[in-house]
Image (cartoon, grey):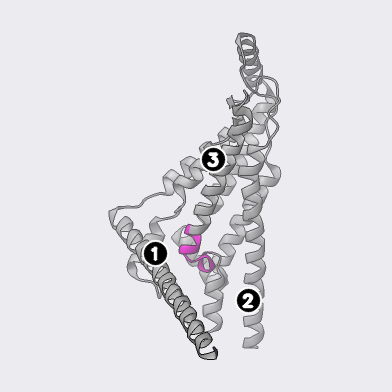
Amino acid sequence: MAVLRSAALVGLSLANFIFVSWSVAEFVAFVSLRQIYRESGRPGAAATGPETDVHTHVKWQSALRDTRVHQALLFNLALLAFFILQHSVMAAESVRRWTLAWFGVLQRSLYVFCTAASLQLLMLFWQSIQAAPFLWSVSREPWGTWFPLICFIIHIIAWLIIFSIVLIFDYAELMGLKQVYYHCLALGDPMVLKSQKAQRLYCHLRHPVFLEFLAILWVVPSLSLDRLLLSTAFTLYMICGHSLDQQDYRYLRSQLNKKFELFSREETTYGQLAAHNCVGESTAGEHRD
């Protein structure tokens, strides 16, 4: 019976891992690729002269009176509010204790599943506002060709940094896999085994990828009304959740230094081993001769 229960827990955590990973991949496409390569040929998207400036001004006047624009903004705002409330309420200590009492070792898996599900709703029902011009749009050549490429490179670098930081912060634990693994092997809660400094950092560092995600949100070739709403909402939310102090920074820096020292030690060991093997092969060749 215990084996079946452990197998069920592992199966649920792995299925959740796949669903969350797929949601993250879709969110990368939603917030980066679709925004960089979206259609920019809407009326009033870019100002190229005095006549276009007047036309853009007129478009803004009509857009701000358009009920479709108002409805789309309100609907998108409701989607953002739902995601932020889910992400914040489930992270509250009282709710965490309740979910831990009911779902046990799957508490973290439930949290990331609900986050991914609300993110899927946000992406699925998000309404792109086509009835209003862009707030800015880089379309003049050669920047109309080069700036989207620059944005793409910046986004790629930012996402690589984000995923690297997540790996440093123990990706398996953030996804709820490690908790199930430790439970099945009767090793207890992995968070309890961490130092008090690490636990304190995790409580404060709700968004360890603050600057990188800001670049992803705002460095885009064109800024529409719906993108402005998305970027502003996520920026304000991250500002509210970012509460590091000097003690947290010192601990984080010491941990990163340890990681770099470990990588350097492994690289040095690998180089010495490779050199030793080369010397051994040369000596063996001389003996054969």
Q: Nearer the viewer, mark 1 or mark 3?
A: 1
Task: Choose top left, top right, bottom left or bottom right for residue 129.
Answer: top right
The front one of 23 and 279 is 279
Q: For residue 166: magenta?
A: yes
Res. 247 in view: yes
Q: CA distance from mark 2 to mark 3?
A: 35 Å
Q: Earlier in the sequence, mark 1 or mark 3?
A: 3
> Cα distance, mark 2 to mark 1?
32 Å
- Mark 1 crowdedness (10 Å alpha carbons): few <14, some 14-19, many ≥20: few
Q: Which residues are magenta?
A: 165-174
In terms of depth relative to the viewer, which is nearer, 167 or 288? Answer: 288
Residue 30 lies in the magenta stretch: no
Q: What x and y, as percent, mark residue 243? A: 37, 50
- The amino acid pointed to by label 1 is Phe
Q: Could you tell me residue 289's position as x and y percent?
A: 54, 88
Amino acid type of the residue that numbered disc 3 sits on in the rendered structure = Leu
Residue occupying the point 57% across, 38% down: 151
Q: Which residue is mark 3?
A: 217
- In three-dimensional space, the C-alpha distance between marks 1 and 3, rounded to whole angstroms, equals 29 Å
Q: Which mark is residue 260?
A: 1
Please report whichever mark, 2 or 3, sits nearer to the chain's N-terminal start.
2
